[in-house]
Amino acid sequence: MENLISLVNRLQRACTALGDNGEDSALPTLWDALPSIAVVGGQSSGKSSVLESIVGKDFLPRGSGIVTRRPLVLQLHRLDEGREYAEFGHLPRKRFTDFAAVRKEISDETDRETGRGGRTISTVPIYLSIYSPNVVNLTLIDLPGLTKVAVEGQPESIVIEIEDMVRSYIEKPNCIILAISPANQDLATSDAIKISREVDPKGERTFGVLTKIDLMDKGTDAVEILEGKAFKLQFPWIGVVNRSQQDINKNVDMIAARRRERDYFAQTPEYRHLVSRMGSEHLGKVLSKHLEAVIKSRIPGLQSLINKTIIELESELSRLGKPIATDAGGKLYMIMEICRTFDGIFKEHLDGVRPGGDKIYNVFDNQLPAALKRLQFDKHLAMENVRKLITEADGYQPHLIAPEQGYRRLIETALITIKGPAEAAVDAVHGVLKELVHKSINETVELKQYPSLRVEVGNAAVESLDRMKEESKKATLQLVEMENSYLTVDFFRKLPQDVEKGGNPTHSIFDRYNDSYLRRIGSTVLSYVNMVCGSLRNSIPKSIVYCQVREAKRSLLDHFFADLGKKEARQLGKLLDEDPTIMQRRVSLAKRLELYRAAQAEIDSVAWSK
C-alpha cells in the first residue's frame, strides 16, 4: 500500500498550489482536514536544530531575535535513491540542490513578505518540500518562536501576534503538537508546554521534545522529565542533543552529529537505559509512524469531508453558470440558450406556472368594466343634450320621420368615449407585461452573470412590448370605430316611426320635441350604447390578448435574435461581459473541484486496499 504520508503530502502540495489552505472561509478546506505536525517552542529553544536533525541538512536561517517570522510548511519525501533536492511552493519549477541556497531563499522570501529588519511577522506560510533518501515521510510546520517581551524596534503587539499565530495552528484537532523545551531551563516556564496544555489539556496529541540535555548544569539531569515523572504526556518524552554552535561554525555534517548524539545517550550513565527512544533519528521515525496512524484513523472523516465539499463545489459552480465560449458560434449559442431560458420563464408567468399572469385577467375583469361604468352615458343622454344634438343634426331641414342623424350623432358622441377605457386597458396590460419581463430577467440566473446581456435582453423585450402595444391600441380602437361606422340595423327597425298625424304645419318644429319624445330618444340611444358597450367589453380583451399577450409569447425576442445573427464575435463577447471576480471564482472552484475529485479517487483507493 502506498505510504499514507506521501499521499497526504501530495494532497497538501495540491492544496498549496490552489490556495486551498484555509484562506477561503466560504467552503471547508482539505488542508485543514489533513493531519500535520506543528513545531512549537520559545525563542532559542533549539527548534531549528531539531528540524535540521530530522532532515539531516543544515538549511534554516539562524541569528538573534525572531528568525522564523513566517510559518514554514516543511514536507519531507523519502527517495529510494537519487540526489537530494528541495523545491519551494512559490518556485515550483526550480530545484535546489545547494541547501545553503535553500537557507538564503527562506530568508529572502521572508523579507519579501515582512520586510527586512526582523521587526514584523506574517501568517502567510512558506512551503518547502525536501526529497532525500535520508528522511522519513513527514510534514512539519515550523512556527515563529514564542517570546515574552518585544525587543527594541519590534511592536509591543508582536508577543500576542506570535501567540495567536501559533494557537491558530495547534488548536485544530488534526494538528499534532511537537513541543520543544530546553532541558537547561525550568520546565514550569516552558512556553511550548504552557500553550500546548491550553489547547490539548490531556496531552493526547502533544509530543514533548527535550533539547540541550548536554548543556545542563553538572550534577543535574533530565531523567525524571524523560521518564514522564516530572510532567506526564500520553506519549513518551524524547531527548535530543543538537549540534553546538562550535559544530555549526565548523560545518560538522548531520551524519556525524547524529552519531555523536547516539554516543552521548549510550555513554552517559543516567540516560543509558533510555537510549532506544532518544535522539533526533528516533524522533523522526516516531513522528512518521504516529502521523501515518493518525492519517489512517482519519480516512473515513476525510472521505466524508471530500464528498460533502464536492457537492458544495458542484452546487456553487452550477450557480455561477457555465464559462464563456471562446468562438463566435459558441458565444451565439450561449446567448440564445440564456435568452430561451428567460423566454421560458416569461411564458411560465403568463401561463400561471409562476405568479403574475393573473394581473392581466384583473385588468379585463375589474379595471375595464369599472372604467366603462364611470363613463355615465345617462348623463351624456340627458334631455337638454339630446334636444341640442337632435336639433343640430337636423340643421335647416327638420327630420321627416325619425331623427336618424340625431340618433347617429348621439350614438357617436357616446361611443367615442369608450376609447379612453380601451386605451387604458391596453396600457395596463402593457404595464403588466413589462413587469413580468423585469421579474423574469431577475429570475433568470444566467443573466445575472452578464450585466450587458441582461440590459440588452431587457431593452429588446420592452421594445417588442412597445411595438405590440401600438399594434394593440390600433386594433382595439378600430373596434370602437367599427361600432361607430356601422350601426346595428335590426335594433333601430324596431323603433316606432315618428309620423305626425293631423299636425299643424304652421307650428314651430320645436313643438315636436316635447319631453316625453326626447326621453324616449335618450332611452333608445342608451339601450343601444349599453348593448355596444357590453359587446366591446368582451371584444377589447380578445383584441388585447391577440395583439399583446399572444404575440409576447410567440415573438418577444424575435427582433433581438435577428440582430444577434448579424453580430461578430467581438460584439457578442461584449454582451458576455462577466464580472472578472466571478470568472476568477469559477476557475478557482473548478480547480478545487478537480483537486477534491482526485483526492477522492486516491483516498478511496487507499481505503479499499486496507
Image (cartoon, rainbow, N blue to C red):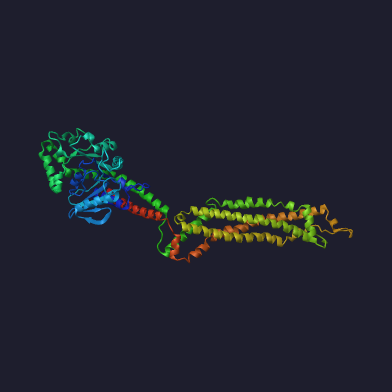
Tell how many labels.
0
- Say if 273 sits above or below 108 in the image: above
Name the quadrant containing residue 97. Answer: bottom left
Q: Position of residue 118 (x, y in %)?
A: 26, 46
Dividing the picture into quarters, in which one does residue 328 lie? Answer: bottom left
Q: Is residue 380 above or below residue 486?
A: above
Vertical order, 159 against 557 (above or below): above
The residue sitting at 25% across, 51% down in the picture is 108
Residue 31 horizontal side relative to residue 181, left or right = right
List x then y, in percent, for residue 514: 83, 54
From the viewer's side, name the closer residue of 133 and 21.
21
Is residue 394 shown left or right of residue 445? right
Q: Is residue 566 found left or right of 22 in the rendered image?
A: right
Q: Residue 137 location in percent, x, y?
A: 22, 48
Q: Nearer the viewer, residue 609 or 317?
A: 317
**Residue 207 visible within the image:** yes
Extreme-front residue of the structure: 152
Look at the image and tell me whether residue 605 can be seen: no
Q: Which x, y percent locates residue 417? A: 69, 56
